Image (cartoon, rainbow, N blue to C red):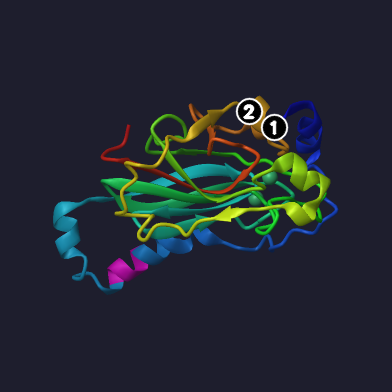
Amino acid sequence: MEARNRLIIERSDVFTSHPPRNSLTAAPLRLAALTITLLAIFGSAPQAEAATAKTVTVTGLVFGDNSFELYVNGKKVASDPILFTPFNAVNVSFRASYPMTFAFKAKDYADPLTGLEYNNTRVGDGGLIAQFSNGVVTGIGWKAKTISHGPTDLPKCLADPTTCKVINTPAPTNWTTTSTTSKWPAAKLYTVAQVQPHLTGFSTMNWGKATFIWGDNLVTDNTILLRKTVTRAS
Ligand SMILES: [Ca+2]
Ligand SMILES: [Ca+2]
């Protein structure tokens, strides 16, 4: 693909002339405080759960090209407040018990009908990296299911956007919790050089042992479900 598309890919997402599609004011991290308040008010309700599972606080840092939603044990605990550019890393904090299932819906900013961006003039690339205080990091052991893939014929699509085709697949029922991932492919690992995160200060942020993950194709896998379950902190 490579020389020709490489140039286009490297330029994608760099330009910031498009306004962010969402505001910077979202504050998704109130859940922990809310949970504590509810426990105080309804102190007797969680007793059955408390008898079998201890709830702990987990913090983390997530960078998604271009955006993500994070669910833990089926509850949405964070979402990226900026869906396109400028790029951003997001601090997250939540309370959950083990076994702990992490489930990301990660989205490259692609037109759902063409798979392209910038008014169908370019193709973008994805990539997600995250590290959490309980030792969970993106990398080996994650499963990835692509639910939006395209364009299916990239060179033809770039030459004539009216020919672009995208394959959209519904997310499996209960994909954040109980649906099996045994048939999902392993998430593919990518280097920082491959993803080229256009985020000031990225290299100075604490990513620990985390590596970028995505589907098999960094360019044409546009929306990805990522899952990992751990039974304890590491
Ligand atoms: Ca973002
Ligand atoms: Ca992108």
Answer whether residue 230 is visible to the viewer in this image.
Answer: yes
Pick whichever, 214 or 204, lies toward us.
214
Is residue 9 on the magenta stretch? Answer: no
Q: Which residue type does callout 1 highlight?
A: Gln
Total numbered labels: 2
Outermost right residue: 17
**Tag 2's secondary structure?**
helix
Q: Quadrant of ligand 2?
A: top right
- On the rendered structure, is 140 left or right of 201? left
Is any atom of residue 211 visible in this view?
no
Q: Which residue shows up at 23% across the image and 50% down it?
A: 54
**Three-letter amino acid code of the residue under disc 2:** Val
Q: Is residue 208 left or right of residue 195?
A: left
Q: Give the x, y percent position of residue 149.
A: 59, 48
Residue assigned mark 1: 196
Would you place residue 14 above or below residue 27 in this image? above
Q: Position of residue 80 (x, y in %)?
A: 59, 54
State the residue at coordinates (47%, 35%).
187
Which label is found at residue 36?
none
Magenta stretch: dominant secondary structure? helix
- Residue 29: image location, x then y, percent: 50, 58
C-beta proximity under 8 Å, tags 1 and 2: yes
Q: Secondary structure at mark 1?
A: loop
Which stretch appears magenta?
36-40
Please indicate whether residue 163 sits to the left or right of residue 91 in the image: right
Q: Quadrant of the C terminus?
A: top left
Q: Which residue is mark 2?
A: 192
